[in-house]
Amino acid sequence: FTLIGSIIFATAFYFLSNFAVKILYSRLSLNDLNITIKMARVQSLSVLTLPLMQTLNACLIACGHIFVPSITSLTASVVKIVLTVLLLKVKSINIFAVIITDIICYLVACLLNLVYIIIRNNKNQVVER
């Protein structure tokens, strides 16, 4: 259900970003408004990845693996910092680097959580045989 809700909200965020930005930042120049709208649309992807990461973290904690989400989030944060430093230097990306690395950070945390769950699941199946 989290994914379905996330898809709905990400789609709404993407298509309504033009309207929202114009209301919230009406005093910006036309160029700045266009950049802000593009940034909001790219950021809409994080509406998909962040809830997925939080759901996986909650599942791991509920199963008694309380430190795994902290470790995967810390690892993803380090990846985000390194990528932000590297991508901010690319002039064609500039400020969009922050948004892109947010999305990558959430994806890395999700992937690490999923890998842990799969490995842990395989170990439990081997023990049961």
Image (spheres, grey):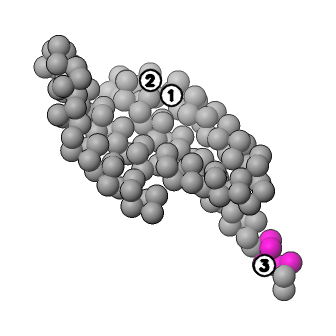
Q: Position of residue 108 (x, y in %)?
A: 57, 47
Q: Residue at x 39, y 61 (%)?
A: 4
Q: Note whether 6 is above or below 103 in the view shown.
A: below
Q: Which mark is residue 125?
A: 3
Task: Please indicate whether residue 89 sits to the left or right of residue 23 in the image.
Answer: right
**Label 3's element?**
helix
Q: Secondary structure at mark 2?
A: loop
The picture places residue 13, in percent across and down from the top left corner, at 29, 43
Q: Residue at x 76, y 49 (%)?
A: 66
Most extreme residue toward the bottom, as rendered? 129
Residue at left 69%, top 47%?
69
* Residue 50 shows in the view: yes
The residue wearing badge 1 is 84
Task: Reply yes or no: does residue 52 show up in magenta.
Answer: no
Write down the residue under mark 2: 88
* Residue type beneath disc 2: Leu
Quadrant occupied by the C terminus: bottom right
Foreground pick, 109 / 89? 109
Q: Looking at numbered disc 1 in the image, what kind of residue is underneath it? A: Thr
Residue 22: image quadrant is: top left
The residue under the point 80% across, 71% down is 123
Q: Nearer the viewer, mark 3 or mark 2?
A: 3
Q: Quadrant of the N terminus?
A: bottom left
